[in-house]
Image (cartoon, rainbow, N blue to C red):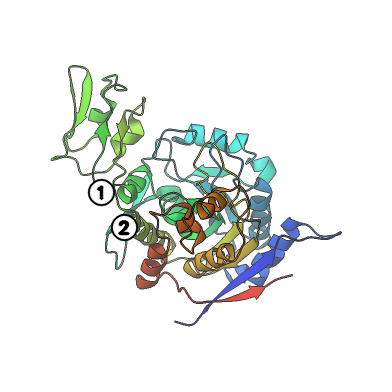
């Protein structure tokens, strides 16, 4: 496979220019106009940020992408799927409210928000994964799969399980329904926190296999009957039903790559990553730690694998910010010659890259082209 083209622009601006203008030039130079957007529904996958976190991408960047897509005749909408964990984005109502609080609205971005997997995270499409080793049929938010064109707009940062969160993480994990997220995180099946259960029976009513049973006012999941669909997680009003986060990080990364394939296969796709505010943890946290390296720039490519590698290489070429988690780990003697594994030594981001290449969603070889 020939090298993928990855386009890059730094965060420097002068009088008469701004970052939105540079982002517009970047994505146009990278070839977004080669896609036929005319009268097409366009899903722009973005992370709206967990309330309390301030490292997420500003909505101004989303508006720039939206405006370009509209200029090209498309019908864009911003989307993300509900979270598996308890927080501000666990159902569509809370999720949209959180997006509004963080500045994302039709007025600030120029388009509407559609939560990909519906009100309770159960509105999913079952998508075959050709060549999948760990996932044969991915559970993807229906509003994501209904789009004619798919665009990822990612905040590139660290991640405590995947190593970093870039294009693959934004697509694969982000577009999974709640059951899809459980499949990626878990080698097992859901269980019930008895102290939180109120015995309402919502889980028993949604379960098609008789696995959820309420006895003496407390629910339980029979794992011999459970098929791991995760619908009980979505309907529990007290978040008493939870997944087991027991998958190894390497396999988690491979599943992320396979879910990415399910999302992008068979339709036009384009990918943008902003390497700014590179916090060590995911934007799913309700807080953000100090960035581990300085802001680097904006990247774009048709190849999500090459894009992630280019962003990782750019981060690894930077000196750590003094006082950051990366700096502290290096001073403590834990330098593993890779910024992401130095921050989280049990992670291996390269496993997602290698698996992505293996299953044919991209290449790890790239040509970096700078855009002024």
Mark 2 highlights which residue?
251
Q: Residue at x 53, y 64 (%)?
A: 312
| Quadrant of residue 20 within the rendered picture | bottom right
Between 70 and 16, the one lying in front of the other is 16
The answer to whether residue 146 of the structure is visible from this angle is: no
The answer to whether 316 appears left or right of 8 in the picture is left
Does 349 appear above or below 34? above
Give coordinates of residue 344: x percent, y percent: 44, 52
Give coordinates of residue 165: x percent, y percent: 49, 54
Do labels 2 and 1 touch, CB within 8 Å?
yes
Which element is circle 1 on? loop
The answer to whether 88 appears left or right of 176 in the picture is right
Disc 2 to disc 1, how far (Cα)? 10 Å
Give coordinates of residue 12: x percent, y percent: 75, 61
Mark 1 highlights which residue?
187
The answer to whether 243 appears left or right of 112 in the picture is left
Which element is circle 2 on? helix
Give coordinates of residue 302: x percent, y percent: 53, 69
């Amino acid at each position: 496979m020939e090298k993928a083209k990855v386009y890059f622009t730094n965060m420097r601006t002068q009088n008469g220019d701004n970052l939105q203008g540079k982002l517009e030039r970047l994505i146009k130079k990278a070839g977004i106009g080669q896609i036929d957007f005319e009268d097409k529904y366009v899903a722009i996958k973005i992370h709206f940020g967990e309330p309390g976190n301030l490292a997420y991408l500003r909505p101004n960047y989303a508006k720039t992408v939206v405006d370009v897509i509209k200029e090209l005749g498309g019908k864009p909408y911003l989307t993300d799927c509900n979270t598996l964990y308890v927080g501000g984005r666990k159902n569509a109502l809370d999720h949209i409210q959180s997006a509004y609080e963080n500045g994302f609205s039709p007025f600030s971005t120029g388009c509407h928000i559609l939560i990909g997997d519906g009100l309770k995270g159960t509105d999913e499409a079952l998508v075959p994964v050709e060549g999948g080793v760990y996932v044969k049929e991915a559970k993807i938010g229906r509003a994501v799969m209904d789009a004619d064109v798919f665009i990822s707009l990612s905040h590139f940062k660290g991640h405590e399980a995947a190593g970093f969160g870039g294009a693959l993480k934004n697509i694969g994990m982000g577009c999974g329904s709640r059951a899809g997220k459980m499949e990626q995180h878990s080698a097992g099946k859901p269980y019930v926190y008895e102290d939180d259960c109120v015995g309402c029976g919502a889980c028993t009513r949604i379960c098609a296999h008789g696995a959820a049973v309420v006895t003496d006012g407390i629910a339980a999941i029979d794992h011999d009957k459970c098929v791991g669909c995760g619908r009980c997680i979505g309907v529990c009003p007290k978040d008493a039903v939870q997944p087991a986060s027991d998958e190894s990080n390497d396999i988690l990364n491979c599943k992320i790559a396979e879910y990415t394939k399910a999302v992008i296969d068979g339709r036009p796709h384009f990918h943008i990553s902003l390497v700014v505010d590179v916090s060590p943890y995911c934007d799913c946290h309700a807080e953000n730690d100090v960035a581990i390296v300085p802001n680097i720039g904006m990247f774009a490519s048709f190849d999500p694998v090459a894009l992630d590698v280019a962003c990782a290489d750019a981060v690894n070429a930077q000196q750590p910010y003094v006082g950051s988690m990366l700096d502290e780990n290096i001073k403590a003697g834990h330098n593993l010659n890779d910024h992401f594994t130095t921050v989280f030594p049990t992670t291996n981001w390269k496993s997602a890259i290698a698996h992505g290449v293996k299953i044919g969603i991209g290449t790890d070889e790239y040509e970096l082209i700078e855009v002024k």
